[in-house]
Image: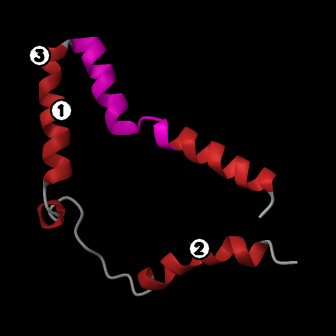
Amino acid sequence: MSFQTWAAFALLFLVLSYTPGPNMLLAASHGMLFGPKRTMATAIGLIAGLASPPPAWEPFWPPRPRPSRPYAGLVRPIWPGWATRP
């Protein structure tokens, strides 16, 4: 791997690692708009949603049969190598 490729990867990795995700942006925007007391409901909801087990989500997103699902995950790591072969 060339130094330029490695440096670009490292820079992109650092930028994406320190960028806040959608949950952090929601909590920050609610904190600015509504104040800390009213934002606690948002924080508790985010924590409860992240801490709840996946079976608790099934009423909202029922599982669907997907026979190709195990194989679809293989395409993502294999495609860059296949597309850039000499």
- Quadrant of the frame with the C terminus: bottom right
Residue 62 placed where, x, y %? 22, 69
38 left or right of 22 in image: left
Residue 65 placed where, x, y %? 32, 82
SS for dot 3: helix
Residue 73 placed where, x, y %? 49, 76
Mark toward the viewer: 2 or 3:
2
Q: Within the magenta stretch, is there residue 61?
A: no
Mark 1 or mark 2: which comes first in sequence?
A: 1
How far is disc 2 from disc 3 in space, using C-alphas?
44 Å
Residue 82 image-quadrant placement: bottom right
Residue 53 image-quadrant placement: bottom left
Q: Residues within 10 Å of mark 1 (few under 14, many from 20)?
A: some
Mark 1 or mark 3: which comes first in sequence?
A: 3
Residue 37 placed where, x, y %? 11, 16
Mark 2 or mark 3: which comes first in sequence?
A: 3
Amino acid type for the residue under numbered disc 3: Lys
- Quadrant of the frame with the N terminus: bottom right
50 left or right of 79 in image: left
Residue at figure coordinates x 69%, y 70% from the top left: 80
Amino acid type for the residue under numbered disc 2: Pro
The magenta region covers 17-34
SS for dot 1: helix
Residue 54 image-quadrant placement: bottom left
Q: Which residue corresponds to mark 1?
A: 43
How far is disc 1 from disc 2 in space, using C-alphas?
35 Å
Instruction: Provide the major secondary structure of the magenta segment.
Output: helix
